[in-house]
């Protein structure tokens, strides 16, 4: 491990001040499940590590005016097992339940995972379906970013230098939302997926009044399947229509070839799994 100086601020302003003071030499850390590996592999070499675990306000989870507010240092496991989340945001609980292993979920944090911007991680597709956003803070103030605008490329976000994700904000879903999250794992349950899909559908009077579909591991960021949504919206979700909607998905994907499959294979799997996820959501 490379040498570094560890800082343990007790307040958010103190943490932001340290990040501003040390600039490119500093990295924030909460769970450390990603940062520690990057440091061990010499991919990042921070001279200063700013621990966020001693900041109480970042470790809170509450509901305010119907919106679930999850602090940036809340562990994945806490989201997964929270009774209120499981009842009112079951898609969110399921997405966090599927992350790696229990040991990882007991350490990995919500804000850290989102800031890491790995396109194969589980939560992003579900968060897009749930119309989530993040609240970020820097020395110049706070702002909110729609979740779809948070990621720009592989491991790249729209966060400005010195900004931190302080809360994940998830609005209350429609009472009649039907949702599902499915991923295809070629090896073990804790592996990254070949493809993963989240879908949410609201059916009223036999027709899709609202629908949102998103994919993980299908490109440099999580991808929203807007063309598929447009085909379904306002229509009866027949098997033929589900297949037609899924057929639009390969064209919007940009996967890489690796040991989990070729790019061509992943595009085909994206179509298959969008259809399957829609079918499961509608059957729930």
Image (cartoon, grey):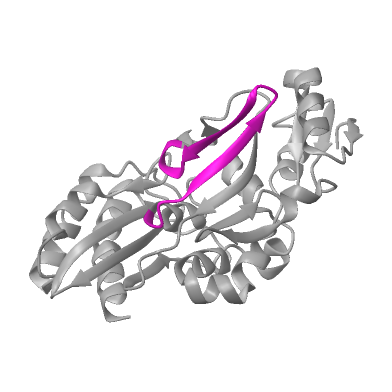
On the rendered image, what quadrant is the C terminus found in? bottom left
Can residue 118 be seen in this snapshot? Answer: no
Q: Position of residue 174 (x, y in %)?
A: 35, 66
Question: Any magenta on residue 130?
Answer: yes
Tell me the quarter of the picture where residue 69 sits. Answer: bottom right
Question: Height in image: 135 above or below 160?
Answer: below
Q: Left or right? Give the position of 198 relative to 26.
A: left
Q: Quadrant of residue 201?
A: bottom left
Taking 3 as reference, is 62 left or right? left
The answer to whether residue 281 is above or below residue 15 is below
Residue 171: x and y, percent?
A: 46, 57
Question: Along the horizontal axis of the image, is 45 left or right of 76?
Answer: right
Residue range in magenta is 129-149
In depth, the one of 15 and 38 nearer the eye is 15
Q: Nearer the viewer, residue 126 or 171?
A: 171
In terms of image quadrants, where is residue 204?
Answer: bottom left
Q: Is residue 67 visible?
A: yes
């Amino acid at each position: 491990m490379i040498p570094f100086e560890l800082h343990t601020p007790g307040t958010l302003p103190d943490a932001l001040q340290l990040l501003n003071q040390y600039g490119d030499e500093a990295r924030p850390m909460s769970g450390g499940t990603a940062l520690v590996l990057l440091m061990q592999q010499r991919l990042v070499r921070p001279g200063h590590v700013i621990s966020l675990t001693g900041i109480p306000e970042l470790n809170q989870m509450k509901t305010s005016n119907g919106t679930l507010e999850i602090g940036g240092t809340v562990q994945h496991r806490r989201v997964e097992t929270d009774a209120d989340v499981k009842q009112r945001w079951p898609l969110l609980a399921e997405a966090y339940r599927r992350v790696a292993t229990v040991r990882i979920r007991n350490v990995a944090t919500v804000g850290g995972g989102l800031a890491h911007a790995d396109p194969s991680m589980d939560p992003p597709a579900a968060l897009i379906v749930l119309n989530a956003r993040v609240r970020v803070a820097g020395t110049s103030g706070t702002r909110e970013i729609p979740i779809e605008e948070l990621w720009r490329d592989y491991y790249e976000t729209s966060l400005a230098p010195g900004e931190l994700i302080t809360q994940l904000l998830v609005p209350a879903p429609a009472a009649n939302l039907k949702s599902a999250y499915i991923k295809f794992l070629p090896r073990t349950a804790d592996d990254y997926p070949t493809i993963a899909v989240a879908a949410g559908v609201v059916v009223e009077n036999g027709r899709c009044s609202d629908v949102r579909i998103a994919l993980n591991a299908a490109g440099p960021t999580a991808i929203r399947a807007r063309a598929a949504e447009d085909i379904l919206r306002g229509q009866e979700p027949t098997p033929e229509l589900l297949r037609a909607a899924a057929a639009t998905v390969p064209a919007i994907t940009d996967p890489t070839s690796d040991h989990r499959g070729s790019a061509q294979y992943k595009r085909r799997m994206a179509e298959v799994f969008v259809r399957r996820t829609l079918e499961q959501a509608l059957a729930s």
